[in-house]
Amino acid sequence: MDKYVLKIKCSDQKGLIYKISTVLYENSLNIEKNSEFVDDESEKFFFRARLDGQIDAQKIKSELQAVMPSDASIVLKKKVKKNIVILATKESHCLGDILLKHDSGELNANILCVVSNHDTLRALCERFKVEYHTVLSKDLSRIDHEKRVLEILNNYEIDYLVLAKYMRILSQEFVSAYEQKIINIHHSFLPAFIGANPYKQAYNRGVKIIGATAHFVNNNLDEGPIIAQDVISVNHEQSWKDMQKAGRNVEKVVLSNALDLVFDERIFIHQNKTIIF
Amino acid sequence: MDKYVLKIKCSDQKGLIYKISTVLYENSLNIEKNSEFVDDESEKFFFRARLDGQIDAQKIKSELQAVMPSDASIVLKKKVKKNIVILATKESHCLGDILLKHDSGELNANILCVVSNHDTLRALCERFKVEYHTVLSKDLSRIDHEKRVLEILNNYEIDYLVLAKYMRILSQEFVSAYEQKIINIHHSFLPAFIGANPYKQAYNRGVKIIGATAHFVNNNLDEGPIIAQDVISVNHEQSWKDMQKAGRNVEKVVLSNALDLVFDERIFIHQNKTIIF
Amino acid sequence: MDKYVLKIKCSDQKGLIYKISTVLYENSLNIEKNSEFVDDESEKFFFRARLDGQIDAQKIKSELQAVMPSDASIVLKKKVKKNIVILATKESHCLGDILLKHDSGELNANILCVVSNHDTLRALCERFKVEYHTVLSKDLSRIDHEKRVLEILNNYEIDYLVLAKYMRILSQEFVSAYEQKIINIHHSFLPAFIGANPYKQAYNRGVKIIGATAHFVNNNLDEGPIIAQDVISVNHEQSWKDMQKAGRNVEKVVLSNALDLVFDERIFIHQNKTIIF
Amino acid sequence: MDKYVLKIKCSDQKGLIYKISTVLYENSLNIEKNSEFVDDESEKFFFRARLDGQIDAQKIKSELQAVMPSDASIVLKKKVKKNIVILATKESHCLGDILLKHDSGELNANILCVVSNHDTLRALCERFKVEYHTVLSKDLSRIDHEKRVLEILNNYEIDYLVLAKYMRILSQEFVSAYEQKIINIHHSFLPAFIGANPYKQAYNRGVKIIGATAHFVNNNLDEGPIIAQDVISVNHEQSWKDMQKAGRNVEKVVLSNALDLVFDERIFIHQNKTIIF
């Protein structure tokens, strides 16, 4: 039996749950789980349900559209594995963790390929028989480098781009081409330590906790909607390299948890925030 | 405008959300937030909503009863401050934290009185003008002691009994008299270190984390439904008294968080577990 | 028997532990616990020991001074309760927590008095028989207000000033008058959300964790050496007021832990960081 | 320049630090970092230092032995990569994490081989060119199975055996053959949920936190000295399989942290506890 996810976002008004549940009930749909949230500030309503059964998605969508507010965005899709491309640079921990989960069948996604600005991680990808493209950035402008990366990406139907410690800043054009589809892991608890070498920044500031943040990428560096964060304790005995080493475990787990949420379609992006069911 | 909480527990079947939302919609009720959960093992459905407005609770309940499964337990009540009695022994941190929150208006409850088997905390309660009853246990059997405590309790209409480090074990009779109304804080992450002096047990076992657990009390010591838990790190340098001191901060925060959930009626007890919306 | 704390800070060189332990051994001192750290960047050596016994502190210090590098700062003091003044504004949770711990004998300090720019917390302090001074800021310049506060403080011998949610920014002159003696609790995990209303900032940024930071105060707002930090998880359902409420438990515990470390003389301030033994 | 670790355990008495530092100073040794701890209950003294330079270990040890209490155990060894064998069953997350860290040069150990009671993880090990031995347990008594495993292990010089989710209970004989050399990861915060399927036990108990524990193995199941523990929050929506999935990230990180501590020789085992510097 197929499984579907229904996601609705619209202006809030009385009776929305009643209207949605009426349509679903009249179509004899079995709701496995539903969640809703109203953002009081923007007066927006968010709804997600997992549905079971033989579903005429087009019919259900039309019927829902007919009763919901005119600004309603309604998505009803069969749950399938996402198709992803991973961008990485030199560090292996996040990429390796994804490859391992993919290998053991725990990742709800197909890895189409890995693209990197270095050749460093090729051997690792080859171990797992994952296609690897190196696009060296030497002697290339940022735009030219991105162009070559995009040429590779254009060969694939991509649901999500995962930046698994990809250490280059993406241009506005690049980000726009994959709007709300790029997930990054940043090695600090944002908004602290935006930008380069956050562990060094953390060390210099003398913080007692360090962390990692997975977020969607938008046009402002490290400022997109946050999906997941976690932290660990550090102390004065740790150099910034010690912090970096300890932080890697946090980075890979936070990214992994974020990907699970994204691939399971449990997230709404609203303004610069996420609503996670 | 009054605020109400609707809580429903029944056998799961198709269309329950539809049926509930139809009744609420037809009565023009504004649902502020609703949550639902289906326990797949027992096939039970749990629903909670916060409602706003002028409500004829009796009418709504009847209409819901008419459409819900016959085993449905339906509670629809105006949100009011709970009336609580606190039982304590000698340690002041949990009691003091509750008194402070009560004093600053953050506690969603009225403290009717404090009952203790020692006179130690009388001065603290008097500072906050809270009635204090000492029931010494010396020369009394457990049953006789409880009888005298119950005599005091019987003078009050009690929604919840809060055991704020009350270091006596309650008899089955006592617990039955306040079924699902007694909240205890245990100074370990249950089910580890049930019983006496869990910090000493933790020290002896050499654990690297200690914790606290707030739970409803049932007839098995420290085995009732868990509401909230938290932990902190410890190391070999800490004696069991150091752990006890560090643990007190965890205990009072875990108890406080649990009381917020209970007083806000966000909890269902199901078998030996809690479902928390 | 008296207890002493010995703290040494100096340039690093070979044999420092040997030299220190020789002096202590030849004076038949019992070292209960010693800790050392070398900061590789600045090549500074830090040492702390708890000593037991009848100690001629002046003699020991001279002997140590004779063998240590010329830049050595050596402190050897009997462990005594610190004398503190608390500055607060309107929120009671941090102040109340300190008053409770003081009341139960768990605070390693005497509270000389509480000074506030509002009268709000007077009743609370009076419950605990702690002197309370209100210095209203209405119609006063910052400098004039501080002057009146300082006039009060000048009546006391103060080891530490504790800012228990004191919501006014201190001038450079004020801070200089109590250098390395002012401890503040900031309601965010610094350096995120410096300045006003960090919970609102956190809500607007859509973070998934919020926190609190206890730090020494220097001349840059919220940028002094960090003593302790902790965080809790939050989600999209929480308004900034919900976050504020949840955060209060973190604030008071982080401040309390920091005060324990300070009062126990376990901290070195080095540049803009703390070294905590 | 070589790096050494000096570890001393003996009865506590006055002047031990003086005596140790005198020997080290007279041998012109550069102490990079030293740590000490006295266990007040057993009156034992523990000391660890990292030393730098050209060291005549035999000479230093003799000189230390001459001045330390007669029960002193003194270990002074060059820091080298440990040689380890990993035992696993079917789950890949802990093994895979170790293989990845080994592959990227972050593991302070050589993996001699992997031994499993199933063939499931062979492909993964082959990806990383790590020798894999399957010892099926079908039709074999526990003793016979262990005998065959031991026959394989006997071919190697093993510093540590890592049980990376090895789901078989080891006999007393097996454990004795590798005393204080076997590290296990248990999928609960011990001592809660000893034995089989702790996630199911945790689910049934309705706990709000689950965790993992890395510990040395002794003759009592899951009761050896604890090295590292960590937890994550769970809620009523999670089935035991969801908890298991979420817990895997904790398991692998806790095991990894424990191995770092072990391979870096930062641990003393004392009675049933660890002292970690």
Image (cartoon, coloured by chain):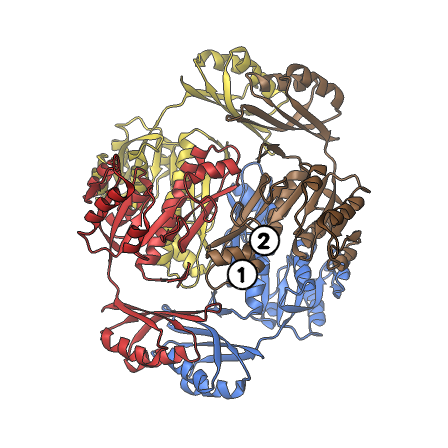
Chain colours: A blue, B red, C yellow, D brown
Residue reaching furthest to the right: D155
Between discs 1 and 2, the one toward the N terminus: 2
Where disc 2 sits, the SS reads loop
| In the foreground, C84 or B98 | B98
> Which numbered disc covers residue D154?
none
Instruction: Answer left or right for B117 relative to C215.
Output: left
Is residue D86 depicted above or below A3 in this figure?
A: above
Q: Read off the residue under disc 2.
A: D196
The answer to whether residue B252 is left or right of residue D139 is left
Image coordinates of residue C124 in percent, x first then y, are 23, 42
When the figure is inspected, residue C67 is found, relative to residue A170, above or below; the finding is: above
Q: Residue at x 54, y 16 (%)?
A: D14
Name the one closer to the observer, C79 or D154. Answer: D154
Q: Quadrant of residue A263?
A: bottom right
Say if B33 sits above or below D4 in the image: below
Query: In this figure, which residue is indicated by the disc labeled 1?
Result: D240
Residue type pointed to by label 1: Trp
Kindly state the secondary structure of the residue where label 1 is placed: helix
Residue D23 rendering spot, x and y as whole percentages: 66, 17
Amino acid carrying mark 2 in the image:
Ala
